Image (spheres, grey):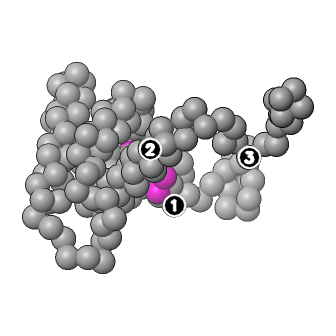
């Protein structure tokens, strides 16, 4: 009996693939969820939260004893993420547990780890803590720069660039 065309290439690096290496189709709901979690408005909501609540995290370290105040802020952060999750599920007519089952199946089906939507990693305490301390440090840097600018306002050139002054030649 003749072989089917294309079958002889299976398992030999040709167009065919071994059964264990078949590409997995990603559920369209998971693709939509990944897009939702990485959209600008989602990122803006997280950034706004971090900016508003980062004060207690200035100079903090994960190696330090974790303060109750940080846990309370984290609980509010998780509530924000959960609210966004609920909004997505309502919009797409699905239950959160079904969405997570599909995500678990998609990520265990040998998809790249980077595919896991940002919301899953973003809800972890370590990510949250690092984001809050980074935001607090950025806020402190901006405040220090504004303070320095205010102290040196009207003092002339503070750019570090030499400018020739003709004023003393006419005195």
Main SS of the magenta segment? helix
Q: What is the CA distance from the residue labelled 1 to the residue labelled 2? A: 61 Å
Image coordinates of residue 81 in percent, x first then y, are 22, 41
Verify CB contact (< 8 Å) between mark 2 and mark 3. no
Q: Nearer the viewer, residue 111 or 164?
A: 164
SS of the residue at dot 2?
helix
User: Which labelled disc corresponds to residue 95?
Assistant: none
- The image quadrant that residue 171 belongs to is top right
For disc 2, the marked residue is 147
SS of the residue at dot 1?
helix
Task: Using a 10 Å C-alpha cutoff, classify the residue at mark 2 as few (fewer than 14 neighbours), some (14 to 19) or many (20 or more).
Answer: few
Q: What is the CA distance from the residue labelled 3 to the residue labelled 1? A: 63 Å
Q: Residue at x 78, y 42 (%)?
A: 161
Q: Nearer the viewer, residue 30 or 38?
A: 38
- N-terminal of the pair, mark 2 or mark 3, is 2
SS of the residue at dot 3?
loop
Residue with the most extreme right position:
169
In the image, residue 123 lies in the stretch drawn in magenta = no
């Amino acid at each position: 009996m003749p072989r089917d065309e294309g079958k002889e290439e299976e398992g030999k690096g040709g167009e065919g693939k071994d059964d264990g290496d078949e590409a997995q189709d990603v559920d369209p709901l998971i693709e939509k969820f990944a897009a939702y979690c990485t959209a600008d408005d989602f990122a803006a909501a997280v950034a706004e939260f971090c900016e508003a609540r980062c004060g207690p995290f200035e100079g903090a370290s994960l190696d330090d004893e974790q303060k109750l105040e940080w846990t309370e802020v984290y609980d509010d952060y998780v509530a924000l993420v959960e609210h966004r999750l609920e909004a997505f599920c309502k919009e797409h007519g699905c239950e959160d547990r079904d969405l997570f089952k599909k995500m678990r199946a998609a990520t265990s089906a040998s998809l790249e780890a980077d595919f896991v939507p940002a919301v899953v990693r973003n809800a972890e305490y370590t990510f949250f803590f690092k984001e809050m301390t980074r935001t607090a440090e950025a806020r402190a840097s901006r405040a220090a720069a504004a303070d320095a600018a205010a102290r040196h306002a009207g003092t002339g050139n503070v750019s570090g660039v030499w400018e020739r002054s003709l004023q003393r030649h006419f005195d």
